[in-house]
Every structure is written in structure tokens, then in C-alpha cells.
Amino acid sequence: MSVLITNIGELFTSDPEGPPTMEAAALVVDGATVAWTGAAADAPPADERVDVGGRAVLPGFVDSHSHLVFAGDRAQEFAARMAGTPYAAGGIRTTVAATRAATDEQLTGHVARLVEEMRRQGTTTVEIKSGYGLTVHDEARSLAVARQFTEETTYLGAHVVPEGDPQEYVDLVTGAMLDAASPHARWIDVFCERGAFDADQARTILRAGAAAGLRGRLHANQLTYGEGVQLAADLGLVAVDHCTYLADADVAALRDSGTIATLLPGVEFSTRQPYPDARRLLDSGVDVALASDCNPGSCFTSSMPLCIALAVREMGMTPAEAVHAATYVGARALDRDDVGALVPGRRADLVVLDAPSHVHLAYRPGVPIVTATWVGGRPHVRATAV
């Protein structure tokens, strides 16, 4: 069945090859895909008509970095940071203990609630990592839970060393744990950072993942300057995430390799660290994506609109650049060409704002202006219970 969505005040297509925005626009959905976009006056007939009353329509947000499979609460850690305690990676172990103690049903219910929360805020594609199990059994079951909600699942056994000898743990991550996790994962990730894994360990882990058929991702340069961004560029990874502390050589490596810098401004909001300099990256020719990094420790927000507002206010992005980073470039960071833009042939994932333009996402921070989320060509219906 075809649906004509018309009387669109601003259609933000996020199309890098055509007009990124259209006014007085319309869009035709045929089944699960976008079939046509253009001026409302030129719209073809359709089986059904939806009038959005002059509201803005955007692609659904693509959240390419999240950690939703966990149990427990770290609100006290957040309160301590707000009182002046610096952020460190070691808090992850607190969540690991709670996650190991949780049942599969508890973990599944928690992820369902967070995914629903994301849907209400316009996120239609989400990547979900493991990383709070850190045993063979718990990493595999975490990914099995995540796979119920998304195809974009990432094995992050290399989150921190839970206990014991680091080399023995690297051997586990690249051996029995990888064997158990890989059937449930598309990606492999490493936290390459002070207090986690160094560049040599990260390279070993990513190579083992590649041999098992997993695409590589990387957390890097979040807490200080380091070798992670250079490693991502050297390996030709599709994206490297955080990128808070960058030397000129890091920026040049990202530009020359084409590796996307995925920035996570919710982390800096929650940890009081310096924000990444998106303006520097964009002006240097680096592609920038935005994602939530929703997790229980350093950034417990599921809101892509908040991340867009922070990117505009704190990182030097224009509203249009931030929305493009949260849609089209986010899709590219997941190596996806079927989502992230409202152009014919892509999946009809879209957001309707109770506002006339995309600028209101930054202009009205914290206000729930997402009035409808469509997934695969149909309005998403909020679950009554999960």
C-alpha cells in the first residue's frame, strides 16, 4: 500500500547528492520504502494520504553507538562526578557484576524499554554492544539479547580487563569468547584507551575478529591523546568513536583514510570532559557522525535530539550538519545505504517534528518535539508494556 505524506513544512532529506531540504514538500511511501519526494503540488496519487500540517519531516535517527545490555544503576557515580570526582574507565566493572547477576528476561526487558524510549525520540536504527558480561557465557548471551532488537550488534569483550592477567584476557577475547560471540554479532569493538587496552592489544583483537568475519570498530582518544585514532585509520575502519583528544596528525589520518569520526557529546555532558571539536574535523574534510553512547556509566541518555543540540551548542556544528551527522553519516558509520536519508529506494524510516524545521531540535533543547516516528513505512505504535 502506498502512502502520501503531504503538507510537509520542511522535508529534510539528508541527501548529499540532491537538495538536503525542501519546503512545501511531500513524500510517497510504497510498502517499506520511500518511492518519491518533491513539491506537494506535484505529488502523485497514493492509496492513503497523511497531512502533517506544516510540520518538518526528517529521516529517522541512526544511533551507531550504544551499550544497552546491562543491569544495575550508577547514579551515585554520576553524582560524584558532578561533585568533582574525575571520570575513569574502571566504573565499568560495577555494571559487569550487576549484568552477570541478571537473568536473560531481565536484560531483555531492560533493552526493550530503552529501545522504546529511543523510538519515541526518533531513533529508528540502533547499534547495540555487549561489553558488560566479560565472560564467554555472558558476552554471548548479551549479544543474543541485543540481536532481538537490531541487526547492528557489536562484540565488545574488549571493554576492560575484568580481573587477572591482561594477556590472558586478550587470549580469551580472541579465542573462546570470540567463538561464542561471533554468531550473534556483526561488528567487533575495542576500548583502546588508558586503563583499558593499548594499540597492540587492540590490533590483535580486531584482526582476530576480522578472521571470524566481524567488521572492526574502535573506542579511541576519549580520555587523553593516544594511538587509537591512528590505528583505526591504518586499519581502514569505517568509523572510530569518541575522538575527543586529537593531534593534527590524527585529524589528517582521519581525512586521508576516510574513517568517520563518531562523536558522542552526551558523554562530555555527563563527565564534564572537554567536548570534541567537530568544527575542526569538518573544516579539515573529516566526515562526522553523532551517536548517543547510551550506557549506565558515562552517558545514560538515549536522546539523539539532545546529542544534536549539544553538537550545535558545544561543538561548532550547524543544525543542518548535526542532523546530517545523526542520520546519513550515522548510517554510513554502520556501512548502511538503506537508511539515514529520505530518498527513493531507502527504507521509509522517518520522524515528524511538532515544529516547522529541523532547527528546532537545537533551538528547543529538552522539549519532546518528536510527534511521530515511522519505521519501515508505518507509524511506530508505542508498546503498552514491555
Image (tube, rainbow, N blue to C red):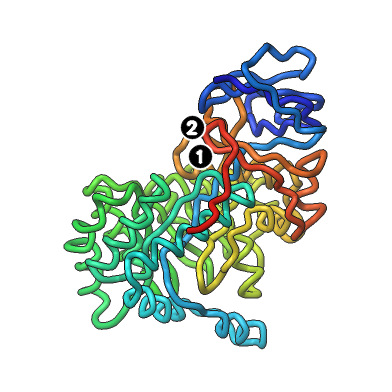
Return the x and y of residue 45 as percentages of the image width and height.
Answer: 67, 12
Label 1 sits on what residue type?
Arg
Residue at the extreme front of the image, as rendered: 384
For the point 45% across and 60% down, the residue is: 111
* Residue 56 position within the rendered picture, expressed as x and y whole percent measured from the top left: 76, 37
What mark, if any, has residue 332 been given in the picture? 1
The residue closer to the viewer here, 250 or 313, is: 313
Residue that appears at 37% across and 50% down: 148
- For image coordinates 19% across by 56% down, the residue present is 179
Circle 2 is placed at which residue position? 337
Among the two numbered marks 2 and 1 on one chain, the one whose residue lies closer to the N terminus: 1
Q: CA distance from mark 2 to mark 1?
A: 7 Å
User: Height in image: 51 above or below 175?
Assistant: above
Amino acid under disc 2: Asp
- Percent coordinates x, y for residue 125 in the rendering: 51, 45
Q: Which mark is residue 305?
A: none
Could you classify mark 2 by the number of other residues whose Cα lies within 10 Å: few (under 14), some (14-19), or many (20 or more)? few
**Residue 259 percent coordinates (x, y):** 49, 45
Q: Is residue 284 left or right of residue 135?
A: right
Tell me if I can see residue 317 in this picture.
yes
Q: Are marks 2 and 1 in contact (CB under 8 Å)?
A: yes
- Residue at 79% x, 26% y is 7
Badge 1: residue crowd in 10 Å (few <14, some 14–19, many ≥20): many
Q: Secondary structure at mark 2?
A: loop
The answer to whether residue 286 of the structure is visible from this angle is: no
